[in-house]
């Protein structure tokens, strides 16, 4: 599991975006980089810098995977038939921690990882504690019976910050979710502008 070493709020301000769409993000009131000169920074960004920033935004959004993990997702996307950008997003959206987050079993992808790592999640009736596990279409993802009354899960489900996307089928009463289909990039409900095509360009250099 990747260890978070810096505040998620600092990440928001450093990358100049409210990555997760949280109302408490300080970027909502201070939309400039942190630090003494953050407000006055006006340097022109190179093409490489733009691609790097796009990569950092996408990588942090999905829970700040380490560079090796993120690059490996790109390599898998490159080997698959079809559009690399769409393949890339599809693989990220198939991750178990992402599906748990999309189904609103957790308020953040970091919290989703914690639920998985602590053994609260089952896929097709079997416990899975690996966040990067790739969910297939029609797989059944559910919260273990003993964990269904956890306050953190109940709180996440009633949270009104975001909606469950159409490609996730949800049985809220029994706390069971299914990935109906692998989404297209245009279907993914990012709260800020993401540019995965630039990430593909970054790794193609």
Image: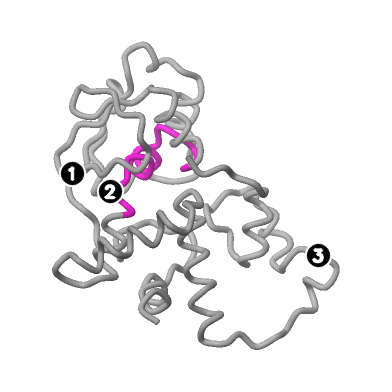
Q: CA distance from mark 3 to mark 1?
A: 43 Å
Above or below, 74 against 146 in this view is below
Q: Residue furthest front?
A: 68
Marker disc for residue 136: 1
Circle 3/circle 1 CB separation < 8 Å? no
Earlier-in-chain disc, 3 versus 2: 3
- Could you tell me residue 98's position as x and y percent? 37, 45
- Along the viewing direction, whichever of 117 and 138 lies nearer the viewer: 117
Q: Which quadrant of the figure contains the C terminus?
A: bottom left
Above or below, 150 against 71 in this view is above
- Could you tell me residue 133's position as x and y percent? 29, 40
Q: Which residue is mark 2?
A: 94
Circle 1/circle 2 CB separation < 8 Å? yes
Q: Dot 3: within a 10 Å radius of its alpha carbon, few (fewer than 14), some, or many (20 or more) residues?
A: few
- Could you tell me residue 195's position as x and y percent? 42, 72
Q: Quadrant of residue 39?
A: bottom right
- Could you tell me residue 109's position as x and y percent? 46, 43
Look at the magenta stretch and give its main secondary structure: helix
């Amino acid at each position: 599991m990747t260890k978070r070493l810096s505040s998620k709020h600092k990440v928001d301000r450093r990358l100049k975006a409210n990555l997760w769409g949280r109302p408490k993000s300080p970027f909502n009131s201070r939309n400039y980089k942190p630090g003494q000169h953050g407000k006055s920074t006006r340097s022109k960004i190179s093409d490489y810098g733009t691609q790097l920033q796009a990569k950092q935004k996408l990588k942090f959004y999905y829970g700040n995977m380490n560079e090796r993990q993120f690059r490996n997702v790109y390599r898998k996307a490159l080997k698959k038939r079809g559009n690399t950008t769409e393949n890339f997003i599809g693989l990220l959206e198939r991750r178990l921690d992402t599906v748990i987050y999309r189904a609103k079993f957790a308020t953040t992808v970091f919290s989703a990882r914690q639920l998985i790592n602590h053994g609260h999640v089952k896929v097709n009736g079997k416990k899975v504690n690996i966040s990067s596990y790739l969910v297939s279409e029609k797989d059944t993802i559910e919260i273990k019976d003993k964990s269904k009354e956890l306050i953190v899960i109940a709180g996440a489900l009633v949270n009104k910050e975001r909606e469950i996307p159409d490609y996730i089928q949800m049985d809220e009463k029994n706390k069971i979710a299914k990935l109906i289909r692998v989404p297209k990039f245009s279907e993914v409900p990012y709260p800020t502008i993401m540019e995965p095509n630039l990430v593909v360009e970054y790794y193609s250099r």
